[in-house]
Image (cartoon, rainbow, N blue to C red):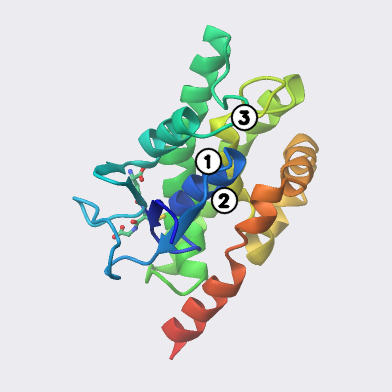
Amino acid sequence: MAELKICGVAPSTFTRTARLVAHEKGLAYDLLPPGTEGAPRHPFGRMPVAARGDTVVCETPAIVRWFDAIGSGPSLVPADPLAAVRMEQWISICCDYVYDTIVRGVLLPRFGLRQRPEADVQADLKKVPDLWRPLEATLKSSRYLAGDAVSLADFFLVPIMFYVPEVPDLMAIAKDGWTEIPRWAREMGQRDSVKATDPMPVLKQMMTRAAQ
Ligand SMILES: N[C@@H](CCC(=O)N[C@@H](CS)C(=O)NCC(=O)O)C(=O)O
């Protein structure tokens, strides 16, 4: 049993962000589904929540800051103050607009994990290019979201963007002339942390269960 526990499920995008940063920072952890014995409880019933000893931390932006501080290796928070501000900006954008529109708006209904009128899904699909345009522009001027080194912000975007190939109508938008987002995705896809946290096997089980 690892000292660090992350309570969540593999397909949850916020849980994957926490796991990605734990991997990046060399932190061994046990992933425990909510409600299992020894799993820390989230005060608002969400996931993830992380715990080590008596320390319990919820809210992914706080969890990854904690992991960055207690883990090993280079910090994932830029030393340059403006780059650190850019990192916070992208984390907030990913947690709010990108999550709401793409995860809640499109992915969960397409995976059969949320019931939603098709017209509402279509309305959110129409918003996707407007979400991706500033990402594309940023990734044209820098290798990663907050500059030329990977930062915490990139690990908020990975879990969401890496579901795009699973959804044909998002893939149709993805084929529409974007160059920098796919370049960033290819680079991020090479990282061991990304390979080690593939959510698809568990997501497929959840989709099968939801369809029954
Ligand atoms: N503000 C939270 C958001 C966490 C969140 O919404 N997680 C989703 C899974 S990706 C969840 O728990 N969904 C279950 C629910 O909404 O009841 C954070 O930063 O961790």
- Identify residue for label 1: 156
Residue visible at 80% across and 38% down in the picture: 179
The amino acid type, in three-letter code, at marker 2 is: Pro
Of the image marks 1 and 3, the number of the one nearer the N terminus = 3
Residue 188 position (above or below residue 135): below
Left or right position of 46 against 170: left
Residue at 46% across, 28% down: 69
**Residue 64 or residue 200, whichever sits in front:** 64
Question: Could you tell me which quadrant the N terminus lies in?
Answer: bottom left
Identify which amino acid the numbered label 1 is placed on: Phe
Residue 57 is situated, as x and y percent measured from the top left of the image, at 30, 41
Asked if the residue at tag 1 contacts the one at tag 2, i.e. Cβ–Cβ closer than 8 Å, the answer is yes
Q: Nearer the viewer, mark 1 or mark 3?
A: 3
Looking at the image, residue 146 lies above or below residue 19 = above
Q: Nearer the viewer, mark 3 or mark 2?
A: 3
Residue ID for mark 3: 73
- Percent of width and height locating residue 55: 27, 41
Quadrant into which the C terminus falls: bottom left
Residue 159 tag number? 2
Choose between 102 and 207: the one closer to the eye: 207
Q: Which numbered tag is attached to residue 145?
A: none
Is 120 drawn above or below residue 81 in the view shown?
Answer: below
Residue shown at 52%/69% (left/top)?
110
Q: Are marks 3 and 2 in contact (CB under 8 Å)?
A: no
User: Hey, which quadrant is residue 187 in on the image?
Assistant: top right
